Image (tube, rainbow, N blue to C red):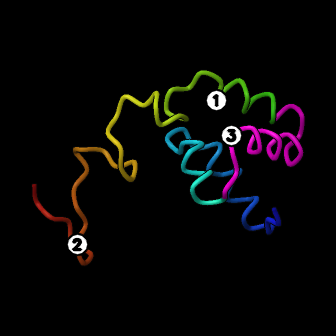
Amino acid sequence: MNLTIVDIDRIIEMAWEDRTTFEAINFQFGLKEQEVIELMRTEMKPSSFKMWRKRVQGRKTKHEKLRAFEKGRFKCSRQKQITHNTISKR
């Protein structure tokens, strides 16, 4: 797969985000979890990669099946709607 520098930067950013699942990365870029791990290994310094792996290993929010919160666009149920630059009331 040919990824641009912008794509690689976005994948790394998504992989670091706690609530972005590997399934979301797969949906957007077509990379499976193991491919994301390999990309992170090649694109990051060894110490940064080790820190990232320690952080995501066992993290329930990185896998859709293990998530305790509702599916969706990673929005808190208490978050207010934003409509035409005005915040709607509940």
Compared to 87, does 15 lie above or below?
above
Q: Please indicate whether residue 77 sits to the left or right of residue 48 in the image.
A: left
Q: Please indicate whether residue 68 sits to the left or right of residue 59 in the image.
A: left
Q: Name the residue that disc number 3 marks.
A: 33
Would you say the magenta stretch is mainly helix, strand or loop?
Answer: helix
**Magenta highlight range:** 30-48
Name the element at disc 2: strand
Compared to 82, does 33 lie above or below?
above
Disc 2 marks a residue whose amino acid type is Thr
Q: Position of residue 8 (x, y in %)?
A: 76, 59
Query: Which is closer to the viewer, label 3 or label 2?
Result: 3
Measured in 3D between alpha carbons, the distance from the residue under mark 3 to the one under mark 1, in whole angstroms, is 11 Å
Compared to 57, does 24 lie above or below?
below
Disc 3 marks a residue whose amino acid type is Glu
- In the rendered image, residue 31 lying in the magenta stretch gets the answer yes
Q: Name the residue that disc number 2 marks.
A: 83
Q: Position of residue 73 (x, y in %)?
A: 39, 53
Task: State which tag comes first along the sequence, 1 or 2.
Answer: 1
Residue at screen point 74% across, 67% down: 6
Q: Position of residue 37 (x, y in %)?
A: 77, 39
Work out whether residue 79 or residue 60 is closer to the camera in this orientation and state it.
Answer: 60
Q: Position of residue 70 (x, y in %)?
A: 32, 39
- In the rendered image, residue 84 lying in the magenta stretch gets the answer no
Work out whether residue 8 or residue 27 is closer to the camera in this orientation and state it.
Answer: 27
Q: Please indicate whether residue 7 sits to the left or right of residue 48 in the image.
A: left
Mark 3 and mark 2 in contact? Answer it, CB < 8 Å: no
Q: Quadrant of the C terminus?
A: bottom left
In the picture as drawn, the residue positioned furthest to the left comes out as 90
Determine the image quadrant of residue 11. Answer: bottom right
Query: Which is closer to the viewer, label 3 or label 1?
Result: 3
Disc 1 marks a residue whose amino acid type is Val
Q: Name the residue that disc number 1 marks.
A: 56
